[in-house]
Image (cartoon, helix red, strand yellow):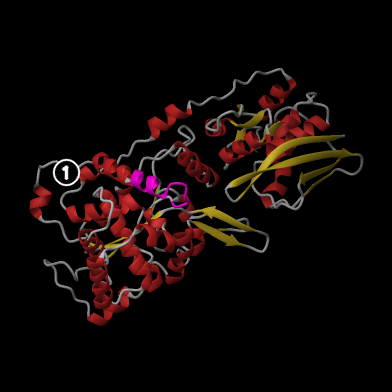
Amino acid sequence: MLAKVLSSTLLGVDAWIIEVEVDLANGLPTFTTVGLPDASIRESRDRVKAAMVNSGFPFPLKRITVNLAPAHVRKEGTAFDLPIALGLLQASGYIQSDQLHTYLVVGELSLDGRVKAIAGAMPMALAVRQTGLQGMIVPAENAAEAAVIEDVPVFGVATLAQAIGFFNGTETIPQTRCDVQTLFQQQAVYHEDFADVKGQQHVKRALEVAAAGAHNVLLVGPPGSGKSLLARRLPSILPDMSLEEAIETSKIHSIAGLLNRERALVATRPFRAPHHSTSDAGLIGGGTIPGPGEVSLAHNGVLFLDELPEFRRSVLEVLRQPLEDAQVTIARAAMTLTFPARLMLTAAMNPCPCGFATDPQHTCVCSAQQIQRYRTRISGPLLDRIDIHVDVPPVHYADLASTAAAEPSRLIRARVNTARERQRSRFGGMTVPHNAAMGVREIRQFCTLDGAGERLLEQAMRHYGLSARAYDRIRKVARTIADLADAETITTEHLSEAIQYRTLERG
């Protein structure tokens, strides 16, 4: 007997429809899985056998062949347990329905027949919508996540017996529904606010400029000056997230298994802060079948690297491609996958190894050579890709003790939204989403300087020895400052502020 069940596997940020073919033949009892399965799929034989027996169904003592088609695509994960079990039961005559192949079925089986959660239910639901299937059968824990994708009937099952009853028509499973707009509005709440930060007005201004143009930013200051505190509140002043961005971001988190099962939608800008001991694979992604790394998990949000010089140089250098291309390509012998990585890089560092070079209340014990060696841990090409460098001085007692209310994030975000709207209007049908993404052609067109501005920038370039990339970055930041000021042209005032945001090159 032959049975066919549709399932799915993940490749990059997309799901592929996989046809699970189960054949029962006479002969010595064997169980063979073909079609480039990984170890977890080959082990499904034992899970499926125990789940069937403990659910009250005999395991067929025949020659069993399971084919995962297309055979040239490598498959991994435990989501094939449930479709393999249903295929065996249909081939054995325990499922009479001819509708099995019209649903996509995914789920991991426990030995007692329970259906356990899997990763990637949301991109699988997107694949169902594209192929026009009748619906999908998922673990009950994944039902809310898959139901976020509209126009896809989702049915959550808790046990193997429940799935069998659904196809035999003996058990009714209610369709899981989700009001996506209501969920999106409920989830779009930030719990960190700039109103919590005392003082540091010029740093807040620099972060507002960075948010308005999606510029990468580096915070330099002594320990305890509030660098991490400010960075963690940066997502709260970024432009409001659209529903399309939320689904796109949620899809990546679904693949990584990071979605909240109850509130399966990322409606706020993600904030990722990996430890400085992370590897390059952890940062950009990796594995036999590559999965998303921190740069992709920060897609549409902020990647925060605290203690930047403590990261291994090889790890920092892999950031170059995602910062320039807004995506990361991972090549392996079996395949090459591309993950989205449109993010704002926010980094923090001390001015010297001991941390007190710019602190007037503490004495720095580092030599000039030690400071130079510490700063050169960050390569020039990477530093050039960071648009804004800003000093974060220690906070004065008067600021800490002040009871005056600081400006909340919602007011700053309103100005940022206005500036981004100006940019969308300016770029029109271009593929440039914001000022930081402008190329040479757009810079030449939209970042023109008058005579005074050209002389000022030329003087700064010569005095500080700035690179050609820094020259373009300054003009882009000046364009963002002009947008915040609702100015059509870049003036020397805007340009001067942009030059001030090159702290490290200014010594």
Residue at 38% from the left image edge and 30% from the top image edge: 186
Residue 376 falls left or right of residue 338 = left
Q: Position of residue 296 (x, y in %)?
A: 48, 52
Residue at 57% from the left image edge and 30% from the top image edge: 140
Q: Height in image: 340 above or below 393?
A: above
Q: Height in image: 385 above or below 240?
A: below
Q: Residue furthest bottom?
A: 369
Q: Position of residue 22 (x, y in %)?
A: 81, 39
Residue type at the position of mark 1:
Ala
The quadrant in which residue 56 appears is: top right
Residue under label 1: 406
Magenta range is 420-432
The quadrant in which residue 4 appears is: top right
Q: Quadrant of the N terminus?
A: top right
Q: Position of residue 232 (x, y in %)?
A: 31, 50
Residue 362 falls left or right of residue 63 = left
Residues 54 and 338: in front is 338
Q: Is residue 404 visible?
A: yes
Q: Residue furthest front?
A: 451
Q: Is residue 439 visible?
A: no
Q: Position of residue 204 (x, y in %)?
A: 22, 52
Q: Residue furthest left?
A: 398
Q: Is residue 114 magenta?
A: no
The quadrant in which residue 374 appears is: bottom left
Magenta-drawn stretch, dominant element (helix, strand or loop): helix
Q: Is residue 422 magenta?
A: yes
Q: Residue furthest right?
A: 26
Residues 225 and 215: in front is 215
Q: Quadrant of the C terminus?
A: bottom left
